[in-house]
Image (cartoon, rainbow, N blue to C red):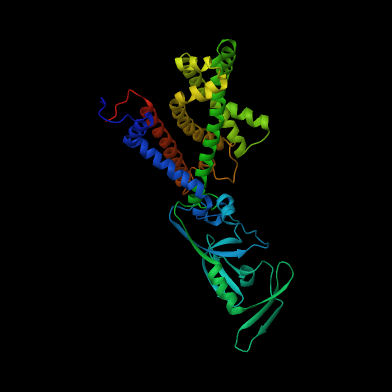
Amino acid sequence: MNIFSEDAKPPGYYIKKKLRANKPAIFGLTIIIASLLISFSGYLIMPDATPDANDGAVQIQKQPPGFRATFLKIRKNREIEKRNFIQRAIFGQESEFIIVPVLNYEIEVFYVRAHIFGKQNYYKEYSILDAVKMKNSMPFEIDETANGDTVLTYRNIEGIEETIFYNDLRKEFEHNNIERRTYWFGTDKMGRDILSRLLFGTRISLSIGFIAVLISMFLGMSLGSIAGFFGGKIDMLILWFMSVTWSIPGIILVIAVSMALQSRGVWVTFVAVGLTMWVEVARVMRGQIMAIKEKSFVEAARAFGISNFRIVFVHILPNVAGPLIVIATANFAAAILLEAGLSFLGIGVQPPTPSWGVMIYEGFQSIGTKNSLHLILFPGLAICILVLSFNLLGNGLRDAYDPKTRLD
């Protein structure tokens, strides 16, 4: 006779059920998943899909959210390498044009006369052929056709003669070389799209958080396992090393790592942030293993001659997965904050890479000037929302793994 009213469920069932019932944790998880989708999509969803979202014009610097502008696009004087779909998603695609913001323009036969944005009564003429084909591609032969059209003969960048009808040239100019853009989050002090840089900054923050957590988990689990399992002098030595590392401020340690590697940038930040966060993992791992290693199933594994490595990573580690997952989410949030602080100080991610910390620093330099509030507000909100999401998820995981928490 079955004395249970319902089938027994594995522990993971109750963990998931308690986590789903925690609305703040689900909210944090939703924000994190959305951030991951933004990070993976990368340049494919950014209004400015150039590398580092760096396509700007200084004439439209620090414009407020919702700003709209008309641009005259002048083709660059070199061939631009075309990238495939995957390369564009990861690295972006360099623009073929230089953008010039204009208030209005008039086409006068072979030239376009543009009123430059931000300059009162300042007009400039551009060759339509330069804008469409290549700079300094002025025609050296102009012929009238029987139907009244005009044929232009010019040399391309490779010095090869080409011809084009004027009517086709004008249509191509109006279709490809005049663009209207809306900057929903405004522009920064270099006239770049803040929304695009915020979206790309999501990838930077999540990447640094992920790599930093991997490094901290690997070092912390390895050293904590050795200290807790073997004890004795090995434990004392590792515990002393952890105490010394713990006493060094994180920023000082990052500076030391950067000096040791003689470099600054994204990859140095990955390593430096990861090396500052492993101590807490090691301490928790050490304490958990010291409590579990005396259990009967560990003694049985030793009696069967199973190696110490297998006992730790196959039999003990699954029993401490819960606390480690909670620490990993907390470290993820801490890594995002630390990276933003380092980039703000100039020892983390380097411009023009759009890290949120770099964006806040650029906005900080503009404090007191006109239209500067949004330069700090948007990246600051992005950091707060993402860090809060990881903290909410971490709290939810802590409650879900706690057997004392009631399941309503």
Tell me the residue at 53%/28% (across/down). 217
Q: Quadrant of the N terminus?
A: top left
Residue nearest the viewer, comparing 143 with 278: 278
Q: Quadrant of the C terminus?
A: top left
Tell me the residue at 47%/13% (across/down). 294
Quadrant in the picture for residue 348: top right
Which residue ends up furthest to the bottom in the rendered image? Answer: 146
Q: Residue 84's spot in the image, x, y percent? A: 59, 57
Would residue 110 be found to the left or right of residue 357 on screen? right
Residue nearest the viewer, comparing 290 with 75: 290
Q: Residue 350's spot in the image, x, y percent? A: 60, 41
Q: Residue 114's spot in the image, x, y percent? A: 56, 68
Tell me the residue at 57%/49% (across/down). 90
Residue nearest the viewer, comparing 346 with 46: 46
Tell me the residue at 58%/39% (across/down). 349
Which residue ends up furthest to the top in the rendered image? Answer: 232
Q: Residue 29's spot in the image, x, y percent? A: 40, 39
Could one spot residue 295 in this view of the protein? Answer: no
Quadrant in the picture for residue 12: top left
Which residue ends up furthest to the front in the rendered image? Answer: 1
Could one spot residue 272 in this view of the protein? Answer: yes
Image height of 64 relative to 158, above or below: above
